[in-house]
Amino acid sequence: MPQNLRKFLYRFMALAILTSVTTPIVASAQESGLPIPRFVALRSDKVFLRSGPGLRYPKVWIYHRRNMPMEVVSEFDTWRKVRDWEGSEGWVHQSLLIGSRHVIVTDENITLYSAADKNARKIALVSASVIGRIEDCPTTVDWCQLRFGDFEGWAPRHGFWGIYDGENIEG
């Protein structure tokens, strides 16, 4: 075999091997394209928080609260690095997260009103650590419409975690 042809074949094989090795890595490291940070919620009532992005990493926490709001702070492949309302961070597989928006009460309690007005009729007093769904959170007022079980009403934008200051959520 001529020397030039042999060099060409070696270079071609080296390039083919290098391409086949790096292509899957590049393809698997793509992000979702969604904004970071962002809020999501737990899909299930049993979710493992891991120390790294993969099943080989140890479980550091087990969440037993479906719809618990979490903040996505980073992404790797199909794994999301999340932070809970107390500041704990770890990795969760994307299949265990949903995009619906929820809050958790962080104050001792919050009051739900029939309208976005402190003089409106009080509907419910919601205790700390209760999880609710965000129905509406317009930027035109400093209030959010929330649902906790059968109770739906308006609450000032403080005393709960799961929404950014000035964020607009239309229901």
Image (spheres, rainbow, N blue to C red):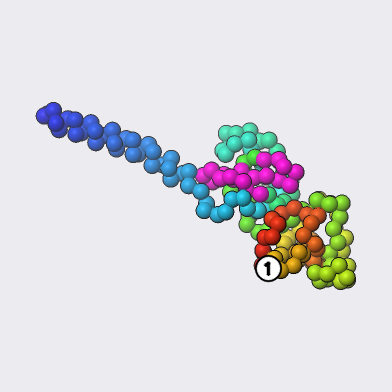
Q: Is 96 positioned to the left or the right of 158 in the image?
A: left
Which of the image's four quarters has the C terminus? Answer: bottom right
Kind of residue at disc 1: Gly
Give yes or no for residue 78 being in the magenta stretch: yes
Query: In the image, what residue occupies the spot 84% across and 52% down?
Result: 107
Question: Mark 1 — residue?
Answer: 171
Using the rendered image of the protein, determine whether residue 72 is visible from the camera's viewpoint: yes
Query: In the image, what residue occupies the spot 52% across and 52% down?
Result: 32
The secondary element bearing badge 1 is classed as: loop
Region of the chain picked out in magenta, as a range: 71-89
Q: Residue furthest left?
A: 2
User: Main SS of the magenta segment?
Assistant: strand
Give yes or no for residue 158 being in the magenta stretch: no
Q: Residues within 10 Å of mark 1 (few under 14, many from 20)?
A: few
Would you place residue 8 above or below residue 85 in this image?
above
Q: Quadrant of residue 62?
A: top right
Using the rendered image of the protein, determine whether residue 42 is visible from the camera's viewpoint: no
